[in-house]
Image (tube, grey):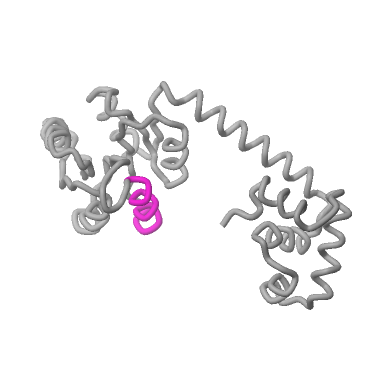
Amino acid sequence: MTRIRVLIAEDDSLLRSSLAELLGLEEDFEVVGSVPNGELALAEAAIVRPDVVLMDIDMPRMDGIEATRRLHATKPDIAVVILTKFGDDESVFSAIKAGALGYVLKDAGLEEIREAVREAHAGNGHLNPALVARVLNEFARVSQKVQEARALFAELTRREVEVLELLGKGRKNRQIADELFLSEKTVKAHVGAILRKLHVNDRTEAALIAQKHGLSDV
């Protein structure tokens, strides 16, 4: 039997040791390490190469969201299951965006934690049932926002969208010209076209539209 290699990252020493002991009793699990923060989780993962990291969010030195993001960027073959007491929307969406495959609340029970680890190892996502409706609603909201942005910017050329994005970041014409390798005169012409097509009076209004629809996100 191929065992699932699990690394536990949890700052609560009692919970960390309990999880290690209980998960270690499973025939298909092998706990290969346990650490108290995200920074050590990254270092340990590089050494023991777990299949799944069971990751707390609220940890010192580096939180679980940032650790997940870095782990996903450097070792995408290692799955992450978030284990936390936080069920707020921001934490859930941040974890998903960071690359976590599972999100389990600490009061969910051992059986759900085990199932989430197994599903993550198989490449499947797992979300605590209490959070499913909220996540679906958020994705629906984001999808609607994307559709609205596409309709709003449909008349803009690709270059005008690039100029608008930089307007949203507060760039002046000279800065935009330098970044896009254009003349300042050409940038001024693009800005004028953007104002006409978006039916706004000035660059400040255009910048606010860019920010509202996520064009200026870094």
Numbered marks: total? 0
Asked whether 196 or 159 is in front, the reply is 196
Image coordinates for residue 37, horizontal then vertical, percent: 23, 49
* Residue in view at x 69 percent, y 58 percent: 165
Q: Is residue 73 magenta?
A: yes
Is 51 drawn above or below residue 127 in the view shown?
Answer: below
Asked whether 78 or 2 is in front, the reply is 78
Of helix, strand and loop, which mostly describes the magenta segment?
A: helix
Is 183 drawn above or below residue 131 in the view shown?
Answer: below
Is 115 drawn above or below residue 218 in the view shown?
Answer: above
Q: Is residue 116 magenta?
A: no
When asked about the image quadrant of residue 143, the answer is top right
Residue 148 visible in the displayed image? yes
Residue 6 visible in the displayed image? no
Image coordinates for residue 163, horizontal then vertical, percent: 74, 63
* Residue in view at x 18 percent, y 47 percent: 35
When asked about the image quadrant of residue 91, the answer is top left
When asked about the image quadrant of residue 170, the answer is bottom right
Image coordinates for residue 203, horizontal then vertical, percent: 78, 58
Image coordinates for residue 51, horizontal then vertical, percent: 27, 46
Quarter holding the C terminus? bottom right
Q: Bounds of the magenta span?
A: 64-76
Q: Is residue 160 left or right of residue 145?
A: right
Asked whether 208 or 41 is in front, the reply is 208
* Residue in view at x 78 percent, y 43 percent: 151
Q: Is residue 89 left or right of residue 153?
A: left
Quarter holding the N terminus? top left
